[in-house]
Amino acid sequence: MRKKVVLACVECGSRNYTTMKNSSEAERLEMKKFCKTCNSHTTHRETK
């Protein structure tokens, strides 16, 4: 089953994106996205 997760910017901590991930994955989801607060492409990590 897939669950909804929130992605937060590593630089400023702004929670910009939501996405789906498989519940069987153990590690946190991490991807590069555009942060409108930082005005640049930064790493976004899954929040708890």
Image: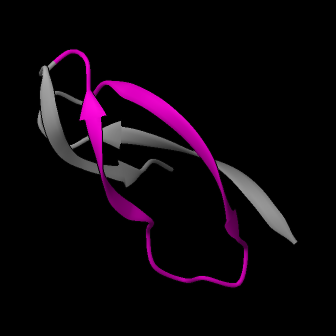
Instruction: Relative to 46, say whether 6 is above or below.
Output: above
Point out the image quarter for the N terminus: bottom right
**Residue 41: image location, x then y, percent:** 17, 39
- Identify the image quadrant of residue 14: top left
Left or right: residue 23 versus residue 47 is: right
Q: Is residue 31 magenta?
A: yes
Left or right: residue 40 versus residue 21 is: left
**Residue 8: image location, x then y, percent:** 36, 38
Left or right: residue 41 versus residue 29 is: left
Instruction: Relative to 34, say whether 4 is above or below.
Output: below
Residue in the foreground of this view, choosing between 17 and 13: 17
- Identify the image quadrant of residue 10: top left
Name the residue located 70 percent from the left edge and 84 percent from the top edge. Answer: 24
Q: Name the residue at the top extreme.
A: 37
- Identify the image quadrant of residue 2: bottom right
Left or right: residue 11 versus residue 30 is: left
Q: Is residue 26 magenta?
A: yes
Q: Name the residue at the right extreme.
A: 1
Name the residue located 44 percent from the left edge and 65 percent from the top edge. Answer: 29
Name the residue located 45 percent from the left edge and 47 percent from the top edge. Answer: 47
**Residue 5: image location, x then y, percent:** 61, 49
**Residue 40: image location, x then y, percent:** 12, 30
Residue in the foreground of this view, choosing between 2 and 26: 2
Magenta stretch, residue numbers: 14-37
